[in-house]
Image: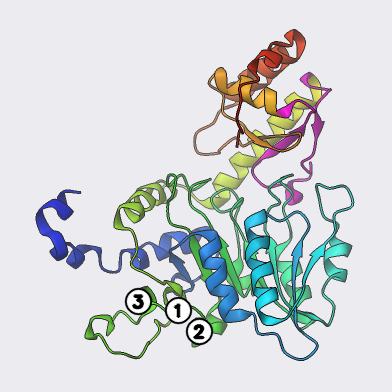
C-alpha cells in the first residue's frame, strides 16, 4: 500500500512478474516444475481458459467427462463448452451419492470422450482420487484429463508433473490460507508448452516483449501464458505471505499431520456421535483433508456450532464438513468440537439456533 501511495505506476518495477515469482513455492506443493504453474484468476475463470485451449472435439471424440459429485461451478463451465462446441457432458455416477468406485471411473473413458475434468478430492465426502492411475487410464483411452484440486492443494501432496496430468486448477483461500478472493492457480504440463491459449490476454504475453505493445499476441513459454488480465497485486501479496509459511514445512509433513488429525476426529465421532454417519473414506489413501458427517439437522447443528465459535462447513441437505487444518488445529480443539456436538444433540439446544439464512 505504501508503494502504491508513493510510487504510483513506478511500483511496477517491483510488482512486474510477482505472479511468476510465486511459481516455485506453488510448484513444490503440486509436484510440478515452476514454469508449469502460475498464480492467477479463479478456479472457474482458469477452467474456462483451459477448456478454451484443450477441448477440441473431433470426429466421434466430442464429449466432456466429469463426475456427478463435482462442485457445481465446474459443471457450469463444462456444460457451456459442450453446448458451444457440439458435445455432451457425461457424468460418472456415484453408487451411494457420496463417493466414486474406481471401476466406474475407468469404465467412463469411452472412445467418445475428448477431455475429462475431475476433482482430486470430492468436496461432499472428502474422498481422494488416484490422480496418477486415473490420468494413465484417460491417456490410454485417448482422452486428455484436467484436475480440480481446490480441496486438496495445501493439505495433500500432488505429483501433477510425474503423473502426466494435462492441466489442473485450484484456489488458495482454503488450505493455502491466502484469504477470501485470493488468486487461484493453474498447472499446465510442459508437454503442452507452445499451444496458443484459447483466451489470450495481456497478462499471458511474453514478459520480455510485453511492453513493446505489439499488436500480435506472443504467449509466455509456460503456464504464465494462461494469465488473461493484470493481476491484483494486493491479492498476490496475501498469497505470497501465506506461501511463506509453507516454506517452513514440507507438504509431506503437512499430510502426515492432517492424517493424524482426521484419524482422531473420525475416532471421536465413532465413539461419541453414533447418530451421525461418517461419509468420508477411512483409508488414508482414499481420504483428503476434511471429514464429512451426515445428520438430518446438519444445518441447525452448523448454526449452533458457529454461535459457540466453532466454524464448520454445511452442505445441503444434511452434511456437516469439518476440516482440521494441519498448520494450526489441535487435538484439543477436535475434542471440544465433538464434545460440543454431543452436548447439542443431547440437549436439543441446536433446535433453537434456527436463524434464517443459508450457511456455507
Residue lying furthest top? 347
Tell me if label 2 and label 1 are in contact, CB under 8 Å.
Answer: yes
- The region drawn magenta spans 272-298
Q: Is residue 320 magenta?
A: no
Residue in view at x 76 percent, y 50 percent: 286
Residue bearing mark 1: 222
Labels 3 and 1: the sequence-earlier one: 3
Residue 278 falls left or right of residue 75: right
Residue bearing mark 3: 202
Residue in view at x 16 percent, y 54 percent: 3
Residue bearing mark 2: 193
Q: Is residue 313 above or below residue 337?
A: below
Residue density around tag 2, few if under 14, some if 14–19, many if 20 or more, within 10 Å = some
Element carrying mark 3: helix
User: Looking at the rendering, in which quadrant would you find the C terminus?
Assistant: top right
Residue density around tag 3, few if under 14, some if 14–19, many if 20 or more, within 10 Å = some
Q: Nearer the viewer, residue 29 or 346?
A: 346
Q: Is residue 276 above or below residue 210?
A: above
Amino acid at each position: 500500500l505504501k508503494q502504491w501511495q508513493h510510487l504510483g505506476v513506478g511500483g511496477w518495477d517491483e510488482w512486474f512478474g510477482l505472479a511468476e515469482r510465486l511459481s516455485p513455492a506453488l510448484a513444490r506443493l503440486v509436484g510440478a516444475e515452476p514454469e508449469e504453474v502460475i498464480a492467477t484468476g479463479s478456479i472457474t475463470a482458469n477452467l474456462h481458459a483451459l477448456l478454451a485451449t484443450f477441448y477440441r472435439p473431433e470426429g466421434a471424440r466430442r464429449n466432456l467427462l466429469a463426475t456427478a459429485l463435482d462442485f457445481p461451478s465446474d459443471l457450469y463451465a463444462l456444460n457451456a463448452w459442450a453446448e458451444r462446441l457440439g458435445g455432451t457432458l457425461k457424468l460418472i455416477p456415484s453408487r451411494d451419492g457420496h463417493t466414486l468406485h474406481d471401476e466406474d471411473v475407468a469404465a467412463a473413458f469411452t472412445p467418445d470422450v475428448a477431455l475429462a475434468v475431475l476433482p482430486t478430492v470430492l468436496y461432499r465426502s472428502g474422498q481422494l482420487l488416484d490422480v496418477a492411475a486415473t490420468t494413465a487410464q484417460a491417456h490410454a483411452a485417448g482422452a486428455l484429463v484436467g484436475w480440480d484440486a481446490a480441496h486438496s492443494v495445501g493439505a495433500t501432496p500432488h505429483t501433477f508433473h510425474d503423473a502426466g496430468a494435462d492441466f489442473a486448477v485450484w484456489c488458495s483461500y482454503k488450505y493455502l490460507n491466502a484469504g477470501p478472493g485470493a488468486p487461484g492457480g493453474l498447472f499446465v504440463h510442459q508437454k503442452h508448452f507452445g499451444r496458443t491459449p484459447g483466451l489470450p490476454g495481456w497478462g499471458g504475453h511474453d514478459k520480455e516483449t510485453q511492453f513493446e505493445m505489439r499488436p500480435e499476441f506472443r504467449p509466455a513459454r509456460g503456464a504464465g501464458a494462461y494469465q488473461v488480465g493484470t493481476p491484483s497485486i494486493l491479492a498476490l501479496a496475501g498469497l505470497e505471505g501465506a506461501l511463506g509459511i509453507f516454506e517452513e514445512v514440507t507438504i509431506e509433513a503437512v499430510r502426515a499431520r492432517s492424517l493424524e488429525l482426521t484419524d482422531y476426529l473420525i475416532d471421536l465421532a465413532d465413539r461419541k456421535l453414533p447418530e451421525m454417519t461418517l461419509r468420508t473414506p477411512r483409508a488414508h489413501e482414499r481420504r483428503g483433508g476434511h471429514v464429512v458427517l451426515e445428520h438430518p439437522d446438519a444445518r441447525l447443528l452448523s448454526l449452533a456450532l458457529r454461535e459457540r465459535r466453532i466454524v464448520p462447513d454445511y452442505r445441503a441437505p444434511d452434511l456437516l464438513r469439518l476440516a482440521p487444518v494441519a498448520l494450526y488445529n489441535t487435538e484439543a480443539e477436535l475434542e471440544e468440537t465433538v464434545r460440543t456436538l454431543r452436548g447439542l444433540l443431547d440437549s436439543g439446544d441446536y433446535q433453537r439456533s434456527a436463524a434464517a439464512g443459508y450457511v456455507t
